[in-house]
Image (tube, rainbow, N blue to C red):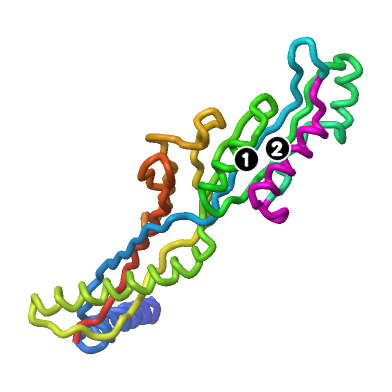
Amino acid sequence: MKKTTLLVATAFLSIVSLAQTTNQPGCYPFPKTISVTGSASMEVIPDEIYVQVDLREYKKRGEDKVELEKIKNDFLANCKAVGIADNDISLASYDGYNLASIWQRRKKDPELLASVSYQVKFSNTKLIDDLVNKLDDQATNNFRITRTSHSKMVEFRKQLKIQAVKAAREKAMYLTEAVNEQLGQAIEINEPDEYSSSDVATGGYRDRYKVANENAVRLDQSKNAYYGIVDDGVDYRKIKLRFEVKVLYALK
């Protein structure tokens, strides 16, 4: 019994001794630190504007139905006429002849209208206006901007992160000087989370893709990276990028 008690007491004294040694000045490599947040932001005009165009068969009174194949061919011809490259046009959805359900439904209702949706990537809003002016109003069921981006987005994000880290260091320097200390080495840098952008501007073809007072904004849970759309008028939308970086510095 005495032997057991002695072992427990020895273990307790070892733990206390270790704790006291750890808390002694000079044992922790960074006894004094400062944590700061740096930020950087920019606005860019998008050069990648993704639009979904919904086309549908139609029939005017007293006339034959305009078939989907003609509507598709006319639409693609109009895209080519305004200078849109083939690789900037892709099929978004198709409710038409290639689906068995359509065949079955058409047997019961020969006048059933088929539809197709295309995604078109534009480099500027002038191209959008040019295409809109050529569209068949009867065949165009909807025309909306689904998202915007920029071809140099990866480079912009890299630049902003670097600027945010530099801003954090500048802030750490003047705050350190305010308390008569000297700034040491950087201990930890918390990079903002990355994610895929899915900014959406809602709207229809009738308003010619121009939407007022409806902005799409994304803010991640860490609140370190902000990516949204700022509406600066009806002619174009600017993309706003903003990053915040937390940096921990040692004090000498």
- Residue 41 higher or lower than 249, as above or below: above
Residue furthest to the front: 81
Query: Nearest the camera: 172 or 82?
Result: 82
Taking the spot 75% from the left edge, 37% from the top edge, the residue there is 74
Question: Is the magenta region chiefly helix, strand or loop?
Answer: helix
Q: Quadrant of residue 176 in the image? A: bottom left
Which residues are the magenta region?
65-88
Taking the spot 50% from the left edge, 67% from the top edge, the residue there is 154
Left or right of 151? Residue 31 is: left
Do labels 2 and 1 touch, CB within 8 Å? yes
The amino acid at mark 2 is Ser
What's the mark number on residue 221? Answer: none
- Residue 122 higher or lower than 9, as above or below: above
Taking the spot 20% from the left edge, 72% from the top edge, the residue there is 171
The residue indicated by pointer 1 is: 52
Query: Nearest the camera: 78 or 245?
Result: 78
The residue indicated by pointer 2 is: 117
Measured from the top left, where is residue 69 in percent x and y?
A: 82, 34
